[in-house]
Image: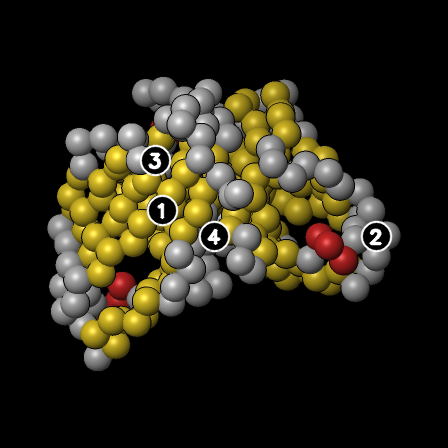
Amino acid sequence: RKEVEQDPGPFNVPEGATVAFNCTYSNSASQSFFWYRQDCRKEPKLLMSVYSSGNEDGRFTAQLNRASQYISLLIRDSKLSDSATYLCVVTSTGGFKTIFGAGTRLFVKA
Amino acid sequence: NAGVTQTPKFQVLKTGQSMTLQCAQDMNHEYMSWYRQDPGMGLRLIHYSVGAGITDQGEVPNGYNVSRSTTEDFPLRLLSAAPSQTSVYFCASSDLRGGLAGYNEQFFGPGTRLTVL
């Protein structure tokens, strides 16, 4: 079993739709959680950190459920520019080893 | 600031050849790391460093060496290239202020696309 698992998609949604991604992790001692965004053939860039209390940044909301060991990302009012691969990232105890999920592809269509 | 830079952008090697992928950052970050990205696998950590003179292995270190003689540079050496090392390689850096590196944003370079024939 992979340490971090994501549905690879693709998710095909119309502009304006709400879409949600989940990610599960296997190490219950994991300390930090992030969502990164990666455009085609580009480097990953931080989208947002994920906190136990949940956090929101504009149209994006991230949640962490430690009991069930999953994190989620909700995108509201999808834009064409949201089309990308979204990477779930988990950092182990100690803080130096980061595990990336394989990513979920999102296509937003006009 | 240039951020994280990587050279070369593309490279083709023959099996058995050696080469060094260069990575440099100008943000004075203590933490630097190398990942490889393969289709369906996500990014996998090869090696990382928490400062000059300190390196450690990640998830997939075999076939790769690293060294960290300065804060700015973190080269990755392929000792004897194999077709299984065909991949996209990303270098990343992060500072250690406010806690351990894993708690902070990682900044990635543009990647090196390596093909081993």
Callout 2 touching callout 4 (CB < 8 Å):
no
Relative height, residue A55 to residue B71 (above, below): below
Query: For the residues carrying marks 2 and 3, which lies nearer the camera in this image?
Result: 3
Q: Residue at x 36, y 20 (%)?
A: B99
Left or right of residue B52, residue A107 in this image? left
Identify which amino acid the numbered label 1 is placed on.
Cys
> Neighbour class for label 2 at 10 Å: few (<14), some, many (≥20)?
few
Q: Nearer the viewer, mark 3 or mark 4?
A: 3
Q: For the N terminus of chain B, which image quadrant?
A: top left
Pointer 4 local density, CA inside 10 Å: few below 14, some 14–19, many at least 20? many
Label 1 and label 4: CA atoms lie apart by 10 Å
Looking at the rendered structure, whether the residues under marks 2 and 3 are on a common chain is answered as no
Camera-side residue of B107 and A52: A52
Residue ranking furthest to the bottom: A110
Location of the C terminus of chain B by quadrant is bottom right
Q: Residue at horizontal 40%, vertical 27%?
A: A28
Foreground residue among A66 and A46: A66
Residue on which the image places disc 3: A69
Q: Which numbered disc flags the more N-terminal residue, 3 or 1?
A: 1
Q: Is residue B29 visible?
A: no
Where residue B58 sits in the image (x, y, percent)? 60, 33
- The residue wearing badge 2 is B17
- Residue type of the residue flagged with mark 3: Gln
C-alpha distance separating marks 2 and 3: 43 Å
